[in-house]
Image (spheres, helix red, strand yellow):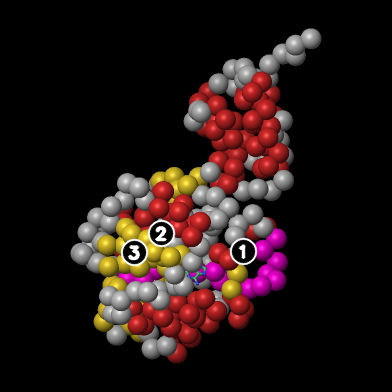
Amino acid sequence: MTRSLSTVRKLLSAAADIPLIDAQLLLGFVLGRSRSWIIAHDNDVVNEKSEKQFRGKLKRRMSGEPIAYILGYQEFWSRNFIVDHNTLIPRPETECMVEVALEQIPNKPTTVLDLGTGCGAIGISLANERCEWMVIANDLSIPALKVAQKNALDTPNISFFQGDWGEAIKPRSMNLIICNPPYIEYGDSHLSELKYEPLNALVSSEYGLYDLKKVIKESRRLLVKDGVLALEHGYRQRNKVCQLLVDYGYENIQTFDDLGGRPRIILARFQ
Ligand SMILES: C[S@@+](CC[C@H](N)C(=O)[O-])C[C@H]1O[C@@H](n2cnc3c(N)ncnc32)[C@H](O)[C@@H]1O
């Protein structure tokens, strides 16, 4: 006996445990359709193969896997970035850092270093916004760099290298260094919600400050006179990061909040 095929509406109603938008995106992905198409076609029938694929993806989502890993991309700065389990999923608060950097740095030829680029979100967004800027992006993770390189195929003014922060970069060569380093403390309760993302992109020793300190220290060697260091940090780390910047001789320290009003971004200059 053959059973009747499901409709779009019936499949979406089977996904009541996840946000409707996620269910629409997953079904749209399987059918090769946009979310607006799904919304407009809820009486359309879905063939058995697509239903099976949808149910498989739904199961992953219901077990807590982020939708970006299931779809294979995340939107950032109005562009879809390929992501996989080797890369952090870029966050909206990081878009705030891109926005601040674009506002604060004059639009003239500039050398930029994106440290810990992950899927390339920060560096590629800056390179696309400012075609006169030359962006270099690094990461310790080779698998992450491979993803970033795929994301940069249509971005000519960015190059990539593997390394421990900026160790291989020429001294006094960068106008802007921008970095969203790992800054979560080992044992932090939020880590259980982030279990699908690479741990080496998230956690840092010394109460989450080890990598921030390393980048602050290293960047003094790499920045040109009056060059800018832009950092993202945890929402409870502002005072400590400001103090580190003062201790390492930075000046003109400016702090910024994310869209939720939480302190997340710091810019500082080095002479
Ligand atoms: C918080 S993620 C940021 C990823 C991306 N920039 C973003 O904002 O979405 C930190 C990144 O730093 C990289 N990383 C960790 N330790 C590093 C090191 N010693 N040198 C270079 N990159 C490192 C990780 O692999 C990861 O991609």
Asked where in the image residue 192 lies, by quadrant, the reply is bottom right
Q: Magenta segment: does it hold 170?
A: no
Q: Secondary structure at mark 2?
A: helix
Disc 2 beta carbon < 8 A from ligand 1? yes
Asked where in the image residue 105 lies, by quadrant, the reply is bottom left
In the image, 143 versus 261, the foreground residue is: 143
- Magenta range: 176-192
- The image position of residue 235, as x and y in percent, is 56, 70
Which label's residue is closer to the chain start, 2 or 1? Answer: 2
Residue type, numbered disc 3: Ile
* Vertical side of 12 occupied by 233: above or below: below
In the image, 247 versus 16, the foreground residue is: 247
Disc 1 beta carbon < 8 A from ligand 1? no
- The image position of residue 126, as x and y in percent, is 33, 58
Residue type, numbered disc 2: Ile
Q: Can you see residue 102?
A: no
- The image position of residue 172, as x and y in percent, is 28, 79
Residue appearing at x 50%, y 45% in the figure: 73
Q: CA distance from mark 2 to mark 3?
A: 11 Å
Which label's residue is closer to the chain start, 2 or 3? Answer: 2
**Residue bearing mark 2:** 122
Which label's residue is closer to the chain start, 1 or 3? Answer: 3
* Residue 151 falls left or right of residue 54: left
**Residue bearing mark 3:** 136
Q: Secondary structure at mark 3?
A: strand
User: Residue 199 has which mark?
Assistant: 1
Q: Quadrant of the N terminus?
A: top right
